[in-house]
Image: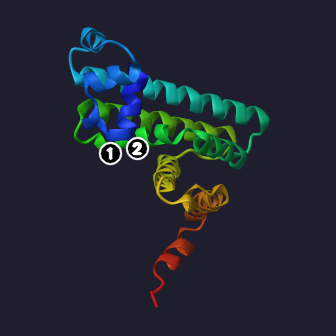
Amino acid sequence: MIRATIEIVAERGVAGVTHRAVTERAGVPLTSATYYFATIDGLVSESLRWYANDRADIFRAAVAEALEDSKTVRSVTEAVAHMIEALPRWERVAFYELLCNAARFPAGAEFARESIEGYSRLVAHVFRQSGQPATTELVRGVFTLEIGRGLLGLIDPQFSDLDWAGTNFRALVAGYHLLAEDPERVEELMRRELK
């Protein structure tokens, strides 16, 4: 039932989750849903928890495997990007649907915060493994870039292009390091007049 709930969230949004819809999708009697989950909020909350833990396990495994093969940030991020692109579309849609509903659904907000913190820790771990600083600003920047790229990739295949993604990732990391090493140069670039 939990997986069925996530599939319905991907197709219809959180508002589309009903006991009947979930049990029909799961192929179980309606009484099963109401026996285990008295409310839709309870069903959605438990499904979000399962989904968050499952996704986190998958990402941790992908990062661990990539780190065994190489210690470069580039190779690990490429491996993770490939893994994200390989996820079924409905799983990616479900993730973004849940993030978008976080403001309206308290359990969704909890899931969103836990997911963001977990993925941010994973990004920081990758940077630390390569001997680079894992500052909050850099980690948030990388995470924000990847979340935006993933969302836009559902709409426009250009954003799913991993070469394009790699170029933007390198630009973000290089820009961060340039800001730390030569803030005056960055300020000069930012003050240039628009033509």
User: Does residue 57 lie above or below 75 as drawn?
Assistant: above
103 vs 53, left or right, is left
The residue sitting at 56% across, 44% down in the picture is 134
Q: Amino acid at mark 2?
A: Tyr
The residue sitting at 60% across, 46% down in the picture is 133
Can the viewer see residue 9?
A: yes
Can the viewer see residue 49?
A: no
Q: Which residue is mark 2?
A: 96
Q: Amino acid at mark 1?
A: Cys
| Secondary element at image label 2 | helix
| Secondary element at image label 1 | helix
The residue sitting at 26% across, 20% down in the picture is 42
> Which mark identifies residue 141?
none
Which residue is the extreme one toward the right? 69
Rendering coords of residue 64 (x, y %): 67, 30
Q: Which residue is mark 1?
A: 100
Rendering coords of residue 123 (x, y %): 56, 41
CA–CA distance in space, label 1 to label 2: 6 Å
Q: Splitting the image into 4 quarters, where does residue 7 fall?
A: top left
